[in-house]
Image (spheres, rainbow, N blue to C red):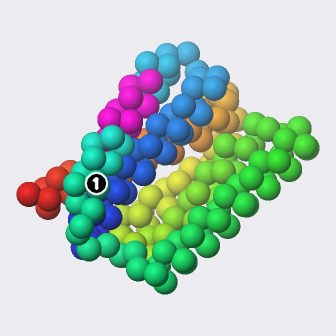
Amino acid sequence: MITDYVRDTAATAAIFGFFAAAWFGWAQDDPPAGWGPLLLTGSIGSMVIAAVGGLLTWRLWSETTAFDEDTSRAFGIVVGIEFGLAALGAVLLAVLKRSELIPPWVALIVGLHLFPVAVLLEYPLVHVVAAAVTVIAIAAVPVAGRWSIPVSAATGAPAGTVLLAAALVSLVAAVARAG
């Protein structure tokens, strides 16, 4: 489940930790009663993992990586398409006065973009995260309606949890292999 590249494992912990905090933050937009402390704890824990993962990535910078000239270019294209589609959809939803659907739209694009990223990084765990975030995006609106909670909470809390778990797994694996 872990990539052979310890530097990429540490970097994944940093990146997933950062974005987990962002998703927990989005869920705090209008959280259901009682969710605030859990979302805040998730955000803080995610940022701690992001910071430790970032420092470890820096320490391991001279280690091998899945990124070469071709992989870097492909990664940039995938991320560029992700940002473009997420922004375009968000603007369109805002214009249509359906802003509550922006979080699941962004989660869907994030989940889908992680599939090619997993291949580029040769990191099977990222496939699991991609599938989970994609399912969360698809389920967010019906779940929000069923439980009478904001769509941002139905998207952000589970997406943050998945990313936090993957960040933690990546960090533990990187620390264990960094020696």
Quarter of the image holding residue 89? bottom right
Name the amino acid, label 1.
Trp
Q: Is residue 123 left or right of residue 145?
A: left
Q: Is residue 124 above or below residue 37?
A: below
Q: Is residue 14 left or right of residue 52?
A: right
> Magenta segment, which residues?
40-49
How many dots with numbers?
Answer: 1
Quarter of the image holding residue 78? bottom right
Q: Nearer the viewer, residue 135 or 66?
A: 66
User: Which residue is at 27% across, 43% downward?
Assistant: 52
Pointer 1: what residue?
Answer: 58
User: Which residue is at 27% across, 62% downward?
Assistant: 61
**Furthest-bottom residue in this view:** 70
* The N terminus - image quarter: bottom left
**Percent from the top left, x then y, of residue 23?**
53, 39
Q: Nearer the viewer, residue 86 or 80?
A: 80
**Percent from the top left, x then y, of residue 8?**
32, 64
Q: Residues within 10 Å of mark 1 (few under 14, many from 20)?
A: few
**Percent from the top left, x then y, of residue 54?**
33, 48
* The C terminus - image quarter: bottom left
Quarter of the image holding residue 80? bottom right
Q: Is residue 116 visible?
A: no
Query: Is-magenta flag for residue 11?
Result: no
